[in-house]
Amino acid sequence: MKEIEANKNAWSKISEDHYQHFKETFAEGIGELNSHIKEELGDISGNKIIHLQCNTGADTIILSKTAKSVTGVDLVPENIYFAKKLAAELGIENVDFIESDIMKLTEIHNEKYDVVFTSEGVLGWLPDLDIWARTIRKLLKETGYLYVFDSHPFFLSLDESKLDKETYEIKYPYFGKCPDEDDSIGGYASEVKHGVKSYFWMHSISDIINSLIKAGMHIEFFNEFTDNYYDSGNMQPSEKNGLYRYIYNTDKYPMSFSLKASVYHVK
């Protein structure tokens, strides 16, 4: 799929930047999951976890400090290279990493996990959430669960450059099915790199929830928040660690969401 190959190439251009960013974060002793995730994920001690779309492995490593073992998966070879390098430099031994397209993961990997974890800038890079959800179901033990934390689709539909002025303008169709094409890649952990093509898909809340239900999952909770994991422009650090918010947005619109889903069993 040309869009996936383009994204793979685009992300490779910022892999080393992400590695350096997270290496510095760990060196400063501030590498941790954001507060929403920490509050909701629950006790993962003794758990076998798979971290989908792991980037250069920062959250994989953080999870490994409590979990029995963590496997990180990412499409981009450079991300996997730097994830392994970062783990080795930090002396982390209970992690491993797999280079794979999430959509094809179960063709090469058939282990079962207590937790499937994915967070912070993930779903929009996937073209088909039905395949994503079926993959998650195949990866989970019968007693396992999925945890997701990501930017809210409604927030992603808005023009971020105008939000600090309390101007709400739809820039990307909330129900749009064609991916948005950009000529750059970058963001909160790297400088923006131009001259590359990247593609991002909009998935509505109903797309996300229904894909999991169709795959045989039970939604245990779905939460929405007025803060987010990155500064989209003139935001203030939230009182929650690792999060940002607009001062005016105490109750106006959601910026992020979380979801927990377990394997559905007929009673």
Image (cartoon, grey):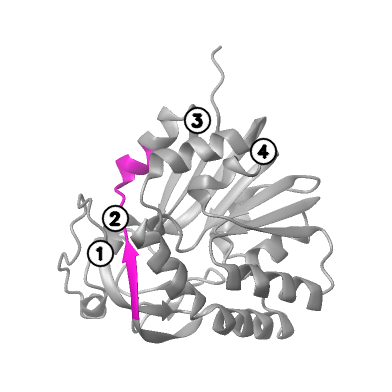
Comes first in the chain, label 4 or label 1: 4
Residue at label 3?
A: 217
Q: Which of 96/21 is in front?
A: 96
SS for dot 2: loop
SS for dot 4: loop
State the separation of the CA atoms marked 4 and 1: 32 Å
**Which part of the image, by quadrant, shows the N terminus?**
bottom left
In the rendered image, the vertical position of residue 63 relative to residue 164, given as above or below = above
Amino acid type shown at disc 3: Met
Residue at label 1?
A: 180
SS for dot 1: strand
Q: Which of 79/188 is in front?
A: 79
**Which part of the image, by quadrant, shows the C terminus?**
top right
Comes first in the chain, label 4 or label 2: 4
User: What's the magenta region?
Assistant: 196-209
Residue 64: percent from left, percent from top:
75, 59
The quadrant where residue 81 appears: bottom right
Asked whether the residues under the numbered discs 4 and 2 touch, taking CB atoms below 8 Å apart as contact, a structural biologist would say: no
Amino acid type shown at disc 1: Asp
Q: Residue at x 29, y 63 (%)?
A: 156
**Disc assigned to residue 110:** 4
State the separation of the CA atoms marked 3 and 2: 22 Å
SS for dot 3: strand
